[in-house]
Amino acid sequence: MALAHAVAGALRPSQVITWLQEDGDAEVLTDATLSGKIRSKRTGAVRDIAGDLTVTDGANGIFTWVYHADDVAVAGLFDVQFTATFGSSPSPARTLTTAWEVKEALA
């Protein structure tokens, strides 16, 4: 799964993400609750994703990340990992870490 770059301080556009397994099949996210972590590649500090993570097409593994100001507060290189929690076993599911860059804003 690839993540689009963001710009520091910009809350738009939101990311539409497809959660793919290593074999290329979509992870079924129907009835899942999503959360995530962001780790700074510079400092190693880990923080929760503060924005909304909403499943939009569970059968095809598609969800949306609507940024919170904390998610894009600082420019830099990060690793991101998403977690899906289900009401039945097996649960949870986690993505591999994915590189994400927040670009510097000129303003």
Image (tube, rainbow, N blue to C red):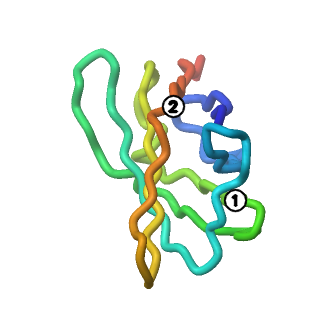
Q: In the figure, 44 relative to 50: above or below?
A: above
Location of residue 70 in the rendering, given as x and y in whole percent from the top left corner: 40, 46
Instruction: Residue at 64% x, 50% y: name it.
Output: 19
Q: In the figure, 75 relative to 93: above or below?
A: above
**Mark 1 — residue?**
61
Disc 2 packing (10 Å; few <14; some 14–19; many ≥20): some
Q: Hey, which quadrant is residue 91 in on the image?
A: bottom left
Secondary structure under the numbered disc 2 in the rendered image: strand
Instruction: Residue at 26% x, 38% y: name it.
Output: 46
Amino acid on which disc 1 is placed: Gly
- Given residues 29 and 40, the one toward you in this image is 29
Instruction: Residue at 56% x, 20% y: name it.
Output: 103
Disc 1 packing (10 Å; few <14; some 14–19; many ≥20): some
Secondary structure under the numbered disc 1 in the rendered image: loop
Numbered label attached to residue 98 = 2
Specify which label sits upstream in the sequence, 2 or 1.
1
- Given residues 76 and 44, the one toward you in this image is 44
**Picture mark count:** 2
Numbered label attached to residue 18 = none
Amino acid on which disc 2 is placed: Thr
Location of residue 68 in the rendering, given as x and y in whole percent from the top left corner: 49, 53
Location of residue 2 in the rendering, given as x and y in whole percent from the top left corner: 66, 32
Instruction: Residue at 77% x, 61% y: name it.
Output: 60
Real-space CA distance between mark 2 and mark 1, rounded to the nearest whole angstrom: 16 Å
